[in-house]
């Protein structure tokens, strides 16, 4: 089994990507552009979507590429970065507790302070997510389009690393922490592990 086929199978089984709306839209656009219908085979439909995603980023000038990447980032920010009304009240209560523990006494978090804390949370999440997107869309990321998609989907689903459990818990809607740090060494390890796993099935 080739790596691209193996990763597409992973995307099919983990995310049901082949029946997602974005894959369906990509298939329609391919038919409009080429006149050819994308086969109903799930892996072919996923590959067509990944090809479309690759073509969108493969612009002939850096300005066009940056513009397209900014649009993709905007979509990810809108979908995955926490919104002000999603920040749980527990977060602000925790800030009060930390202030007491640090010797600042009982502080009041007024509207202005709440606004500032909210802006920091959103900025940190946006920045941490952008680092992944910038890297995965750059020539420095030597991975297949399918693996890049899987990595990014994994990142937006991950909460902060749990040292006791030695695992990344599932990210919830009210998570205030940034997205996981970009770790190129860990990515290379994952890429190598996937290749070895599926090469053994050939």
Image: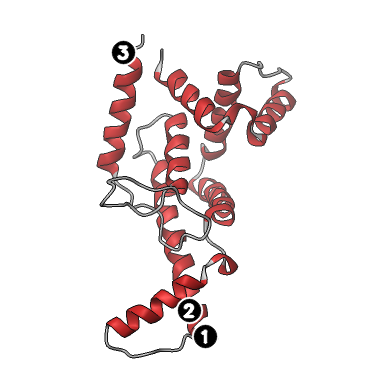
Left or right of 162, for residue 94: right
The crowding category of the residue bearing disc 2, from other C-alpha atoms within 10 Å (few below 14, some 14 to 19, many at least 20), is few
Could you say where residue 49 lies in the image, as x and y percent from the top left? Answer: 59, 29
Residue 39 visible in the snapshot = yes
Query: In this view of the protein, which residue sits in the foreground, 197 or 25?
Result: 197
In this picture, is 110 found above or below 149?
A: below
Could you say where residue 133 lies in the image, as x and y percent from the top left? Answer: 44, 47
Image quarter where the N terminus lies is top left
Q: Which mark is residue 112?
A: 1
Left or right of 163, for residue 147: right
Q: Quadrant of residue 2?
A: top left
At 39% from the left and 48% from the top, the residue drawn is: 169
For marks 3 and 1 on the same chain, the one whose residue lies earlier in the sequence: 1
At 28% from the left and 35% from the top, the residue drawn is: 188
At 31% from the left and 33% from the top, the residue drawn is: 190
Residue identified by numbered label 2: 116
Distance from Cα at disc 1 to Cα at disc 2: 6 Å
Residue identified by numbered label 3: 200
């Amino acid at each position: 089994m080739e790596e691209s086929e193996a990763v597409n199978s992973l995307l099919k089984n983990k995310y049901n990507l082949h029946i997602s709306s974005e894959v369906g839209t990509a298939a329609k656009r391919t038919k409009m552009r080429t006149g050819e219908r994308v086969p109903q085979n799930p892996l072919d439909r996923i590959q067509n979507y990944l090809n479309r995603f690759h073509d969108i980023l493969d612009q002939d000038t850096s300005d066009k590429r940056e513009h397209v990447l900014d649009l993709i980032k905007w979509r990810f920010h809108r979908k995955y970065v926490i919104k002000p009304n999603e920040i749980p009240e527990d977060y602000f209560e925790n800030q009060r507790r930390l202030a007491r523990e640090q010797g600042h006494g009982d502080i009041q978090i007024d509207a202005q302070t709440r606004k500032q804390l909210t802006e920091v949370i959103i900025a940190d999440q946006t920045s941490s997510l952008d680092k992944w997107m910038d890297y995965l869309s750059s020539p420095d990321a030597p991975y297949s389009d399918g693996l890049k998609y899987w990595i990014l989907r994994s990142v937006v689903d991950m909460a902060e690393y749990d040292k006791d459990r030695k695992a990344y818990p599932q990210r919830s809607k009210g998570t205030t922490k940034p997205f996981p740090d970009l770790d190129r060494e860990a990515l290379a390890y994952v890429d190598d592990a996937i290749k070895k796993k599926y090469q053994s099935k050939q």
